[in-house]
Image: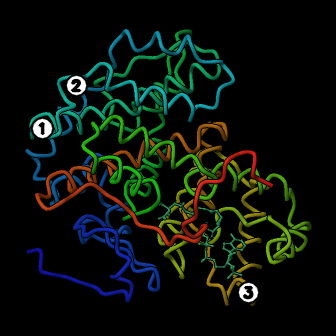
Amino acid sequence: QTGMFTYDPGFTSTASCESKITYIDGNEGTLLYRGYPIEQVAENGDFLETCYLLLYGELPTQAQKEDFVHRVTYHTMIHEQMTRFFAGFRRDAHPMAVMCGMVGALSAFYHDSTDISDPHQRMIASLRMIAKMPTIAAMAYKYHIGQPFVFPRNDLDYAANFLHMCFSVPCEEYKVNPVLARAMDRIFILHADHEQNASTSTVRLAGSSGANPFACIAAGIACLWGPAHGGANEAALTMLAEIGSVDNIPEYIARAKDKNDPFRLMGFGHRVYKNYDPRARIMQKTCHEVLAELGIKDDPLLDVAMELEKIALSDDYFVEKKLYPNIDFYSGITLRALGFPTTMFTVLFSLARTVGWIAQWKEMVEDPSQKIGRPRQLYTGAAQRDYTPIGQRR
Ligand code: SDX
């Protein structure tokens, strides 16, 4: 029973849209996917079930889930001609640059799912995006490291298939570790949607013009890449590595507080959360599980991260400004332990966030009242004046 649940956070005048998908209470540190707390979804569900929930608004029955998983599974390959695009990229290109190019190019191939007025084409485009993102992401990784592409397998579940496409090589059997696959799946759930963040708002704005879904998702990927947004997981790990040891933490805390120093604690703070990001807690728990499964007794960067969090959360500056760890603070350590280079961290974020972007895009295009987005501005430029011929300019 979905009751009418409206919450006026006091800023409805600047609310960019209405949505039924994800609810955040930044003061309480609450995150709900279609009303279900992120803690319960991450603990009990799996990523494709979460995709169904975000897209259609309800948890699937067993039959609905099996049908959805089957349809996603049978869309995981990409058009063979698309693989030739990779030859045009430098091997040392950032994988996010490749993702922007490859995902935008999907609209150059799948002409049968670009007409947004057709519900069937919208559904096919949604399935294709969810299904093909792991394949494209894995190909971007393999191309980056100079290894051959690995085809998806239909006998593996979503996260296991992704790990297989990233880490298996033709020379030997690769067995997916189920504990690591479950951790990967949970990390995808944590990143799936997050209300009207910068990249989701980009997808909505692009979609409001009637642009096709592949082009809109490519716009979202471009926006997510920024270090203030999805690029923070890569920046957070780089920061932890730069700090290097707990002895150096006070110096970096001082720099983070210094208004004249551009340094920011990456993975800390949030536009909405003025309390602990609930995803960060689950990510920290997942980090410990992955390190334990891999037999990594002490990861120096995890030691730095936990000590940094402890010191920051007892420091008046961070307490007054309500700066807490966000999802990106522990994700880098976890993804590195899983075997990914820092350049792949935001790619994984974009892979998981694709379902949120698509669900929000779908909600918008299916709203008969929606119009093209057109943010206004506060003009602070020159008052009206007459043109000055070049000979009279000083
Ligand atoms: C994501 O929107 C989403 O939902 C995004 C996301 C999602 O799932 O889509 O949650 C994913 O992008 C998480 C955020 C990842 N980014 C980082 O971790 C980068 C580091 N964080 C900062 O850059 C910052 O916290 C932002 C960009 C996230 C938010 O910056 P704001 O809007 O300035 O935050 P704020 O207004 O709450 O800041 C309050 C004060 C400011 O100082 P004053 O102007 O009041 O003097 O705190 C300062 C900020 O300068 N501050 C920090 C800080 N973050 C904010 N000071 C030091 N270190 C930080 N990390």
Report, in whole angstroms, how far the alpha carbon at label 2 lies from the one at label 3: 50 Å
Q: Secondary structure at mark 2?
A: loop
Q: Name the disc covering residue 74, or none.
A: 2
Q: Secondary structure at mark 1?
A: helix
Residue displayed at 49% across by 33% down? 100
The picture quadrant where one finds residue 262 is bottom right
Q: At which x and y percent is residue 29?
A: 46, 79
Question: Circle 3: is it few (<14), some (14-19), or many (20+) Cα within 10 Å?
Answer: few
Identify which residue, 346 or 138, lies in the foreground: 346
Picture quarter with the N terminus: bottom left
Q: Name the disc covering residue 67, or none.
A: 1
Picture quarter with the C terminus: bottom right
What type is the residue that disc 2 sits on? Tyr
What type is the residue that disc 3 sits on? Ser
Depicted 53 relative to depicted 166: above or below: below
Check mark 3 vs ligand 1: CB closer than 8 Å? yes or no: no
Image quarter where ligand 1 lies: bottom right
Report, in whole angstroms, how far the alpha carbon at label 1 lies from the one at label 3: 50 Å
Depicted 132 relative to depicted 46: above or below: above
* First reached walking from the N terminus: tag 1 or tag 3: 1
Q: Can see residue 171?
A: yes
Image side of residue 361 versus residue 313, left or right: left
Q: At which x and y percent is residue 70?
A: 18, 32
Report, in whole angstroms, how far the alpha carbon at label 1 lies from the one at label 2: 11 Å
* First reached walking from the N terminus: tag 1 or tag 2: 1
Is the Cβ of the residue at disc 2 closer than 8 Å to that at disc 3? no
Residue where numbered disc 3 is placed: 314
Check mark 2 vs ligand 1: CB closer than 8 Å? yes or no: no
Q: At which x and y percent is residue 290?
A: 57, 50
Q: Secondary structure at mark 3?
A: loop
